[in-house]
């Protein structure tokens, strides 16, 4: 399962979610504006900006089509 940590008014977050939807990749979205309890967890993983995409041992931040393609 792919997890996307996102925020409101985040253009890259919207682009990641659209890319995944267009490729029919199922994902779980966690909006950290609505669920701030996840902020410390993602900081502990070394991330400081949304979107954060995680699947198994692959994790990255931002809209990165080459990395997203690895999820298909």
Image (cartoon, rainbow, N blue to C red):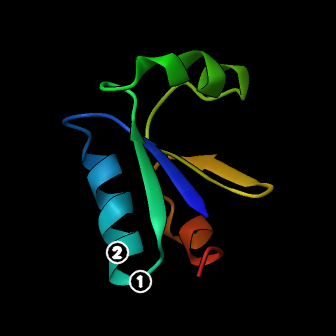
Image quadrant in which you'd find residue 67? bottom right
The quadrant of the image that shows the N terminus is bottom right
- Rendering coords of residue 4 (x, y %): 48, 50
Give neighbour class at mark 1: few <14, some 14-19, many 20+ (Cα, 10 Å). few
Q: Residue at x 44, y 36 (%)?
A: 50
Q: Give above or below for 2 relative to 22.
A: above
Which residue is more in the foreground, 5 or 19?
5
Give the Cα distance between marks 2 and 1. Answer: 5 Å
Does the image show residue 63? no
> For mark 1, what is the residue?
24
- Rendering coords of residue 66 (x, y %): 58, 71
- Rendering coords of residue 13 (x, y %): 34, 48
Q: Give above or below for 7 relative to 65.
A: above
Which residue is more in the foreground, 64 or 59?
59
The quadrant of the image that shows the C terminus is bottom right
Image quadrant in which you'd find residue 56? bottom right
The mark tally for this picture is 2
- Rendering coords of residue 43 (x, y %): 63, 20
Q: Give above or below for 41 relative to 68.
A: above
Q: Residue at x 47, y 63 (%)?
A: 27
Q: Residue at x 53, y 24 (%)?
A: 38
For label 1, the SS is loop
For label 2, the SS is helix
> For mark 2, what is the residue?
21
């Amino acid at each position: 399962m792919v997890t996307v940590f996102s925020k409101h008014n985040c253009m890259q977050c919207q682009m990641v979610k659209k890319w995944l939807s267009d490729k029919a990749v199922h994902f779980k979205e966690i909006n950290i504006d609505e669920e701030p309890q996840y902020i410390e967890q993602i900081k502990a993983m070394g991330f400081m900006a949304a979107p954060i995409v995680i699947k198994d041992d692959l994790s990255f931040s931002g809209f990165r089509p080459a990395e997203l393609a690895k999820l298909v």
